[in-house]
Image (tube, rainbow, N blue to C red):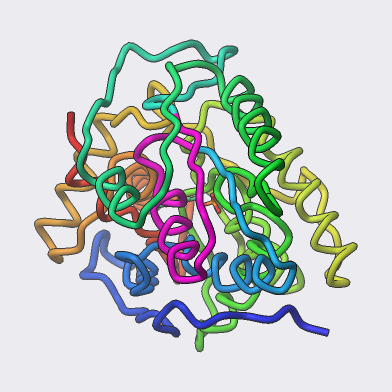
Amino acid sequence: MSPRRVSLCTLPTPCHLLPELVPGAEVWIKRDDLTGFAMGGNKGRKLEFLLADLQDRGVEIVVSCGATQSNFIRQLAAACRIGGIEFHAVVMDLPFDSDAGKPAYTPRAHNGNRLLTEKFGAHLHVMPDDDWEVLYSHMERIAEDLRTRGVVEVIPVGGSTYLGAYAFTLAAKELDQPFDHIVFASSSGSTHVGLATAFAQTKTRIHGIAVDPEPGLIHDFAALSTSLANQLGFPALASSDFVLDMRFVGEGYGVPSPEGEAALHSLLSSTGIVLDSTYTAKAYAGLLHLVTSGELTGKILFWHTGGTPLIFAEP
Ligand SMILES: *Cc1c(COP(=O)(O)O)cnc(C)c1O
């Protein structure tokens, strides 16, 4: 039986050709910046299934975590507001990966996603910057405390459960023409797992651009794929099935990169389409490199995953 879905987004999102970047290269763009829910982005697709599941299981309090400027936290706050569910967001301004090191950058904006998250009525628990693992343990502790007050559900970072991945297997079906390559910003994994699953038996190659300095994420993607296989019967993928291109991360998650900023300005100036510094600008910088170097040829789709409110969160 397919999972129940609440309608939040305006689907299908548009898909159109970009002006010629390189002679001979044909690059299209899938506009998930225009999903229409709580200012758009890829998380709206996941939340259609996540919210239905929360409602079906009678969840009263939701706890999740991310960066203070998280797109997922913003859209989850909106979904909980609509569903009448109390929402607690455990956040850090700049969570980081200790192995890669703490970046010398401090985003402290109170506008952008944070402003919207507050407007949607979330309870914000702001923690000092630390490793992601520390953020996860704060989240578990806060969730434990809340369990005395009602039915609590913890939603993992980015909404990357099997339902989130399932939403992207369906998103893939919106494409009405074949592409040789699909390029996009990959992070918590459900976008990547959903697309890779949907195109596994086709000629379309899925090229995720990493925005976290953690090559090991492909093992988390494989675990998520196993969960999607167990819950809904899709074929499971192995870590080696995921292409996660590490070359465009820059100094770390949430830290703008010079290539990303140049790519952002290039798309903005040629089309009026806005990218964000954390995800889509780095992915588009990757795409420009892949196309101009001839690493990718043929018909290419850039999947714009959203993040537009981040443009208003410059420190
Ligand atoms: C969350 C997010 C991504 C990454 O999607 P995942 O499913 O978490 O990998 C990419 N772009 C934007 C704008 C996002 O908010």
Q: Is residue 26 visible?
A: no
Task: Give the farthest residue toward the bottom.
Answer: 176
Quarter of the figure with the C terminus: top left
Where residue 20 sits, quadrant-wise, is bottom left
Asked whether, in this view, residue 267 is left or right of residue 197, the answer is left
Q: Nearer the viewer, residue 22 or 67?
A: 67
Residue 119 locus on image (x, y percent): 28, 54
Q: Residue at the spot x=80%, y=46% of the render? A: 223
The residue sitting at 46% across, 55% down in the picture is: 184
Residue 246 in picture, x, y percent from top left: 52, 33
Q: Is residue 290 above or below residue 94?
A: below
Residue at the image point whose x is 61% and y is 32% from the top:
142
Residue 72 is covered by the magenta coloring: yes
Residue 151 falls left or right of residue 254: right
Does the magenta-highlighted stretch encompass residue 136?
Answer: no
Q: Is residue 16 visible?
A: yes
**Magenta residues (range):** 66-91
Where residue 193 sits: x, y (%)? 67, 57
**For the view shown, which residue lies furthest in the left direction?**
269
Q: Quadrant of residue 12?
A: bottom left
Q: Quadrant of the N terminus?
A: bottom right
> Which residue occupies the extreme front position in the image?
149
Residues 92 and 125: in front is: 125
Question: In the image, is residue 200 above or below residue 224?
Answer: below
Task: Indicate whether 55 appears above or below 212.
Answer: below
Where does residue 297 sit, x and y in percent of width and height? 46, 61
**In the depicted view, which residue is nearer to us: 284 or 294?**
284
